[in-house]
Amino acid sequence: MRKQLQQLSHDIKGLLVADPDHLFDFMDRDLIDLNHIMFLEVAEADRMADMGPEPQIRKGSTVRRKASLWHLTSTIFLCHISKEIKVLANDFLSDYLFMAVAIVGSTSINSIQQLPYVSVHRKWWVLVGLLT
């Protein structure tokens, strides 16, 4: 975690990918300034749901307020979406996109994860292409 803290000691600009535990821990300790973030992706967000969704999502809504974010695009990826998560999404998000790749509430044996290699120089453009 020391290496992560050193990297975060520089201004964060543009993109931040974080798991909920580290993101909220760093926010609680005022180690992250989110004012220049344009894209925030919360990785491993299923753990937020496993821990009981409401406290984590309410805390996550603080991310947007702390960053004074008119310009922030947030993405949260979940494999399993409960009814509670959908209700909270309606409470906290505006103009959001809900995308299901399977029947909500079902399991899929056909899920495939793809992790393409992307050169350092193309990462930004590949990410923007995936998000738009």
Image: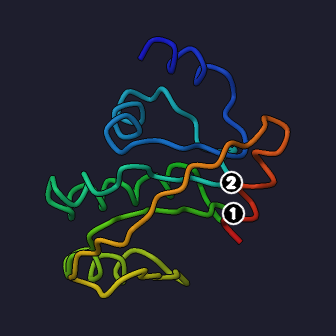
Q: Residues within 10 Å of mark 1 (few under 14, many from 20)?
A: few
Residue at numbered disc 1: 71
Q: Nearer the viewer, residue 24 or 98?
A: 98
Residue at the far right: name it.
121
Name the foreground residue: 43 vs 25.
Answer: 43
- Please indicate whether residue 57 sits to the left or right of residue 83 in the image: right
Q: Please tell me whether residue 108 is drawn above or below residue 55 in the rendered image.
A: below
* CB under 8 Å between discs 1 and 2: yes
Amino acid type at circle 2 is: Met
Q: Position of residue 61 (x, y in %)?
A: 40, 60
Q: Which secondary structure, mark 1?
A: loop
Residue 38, label in figure: 2
- Which residue shows up at 60% across the image and 20% down it? 7
Is residue 20 placed above or below 46 in the rendered structure?
Answer: above
Residue at image coords 58%, 24%: 8
Mark carried by residue 81: none
Residue 6 placement: quadrant? top right
Mark 1 vs mark 2: in front: 2
**Left or right of 41 in this view: 82:** left
What residue is rendered at 26% in x and 83% in y? 87
Question: In which quadrant of the rendered image does the N terminus lie?
Answer: top left
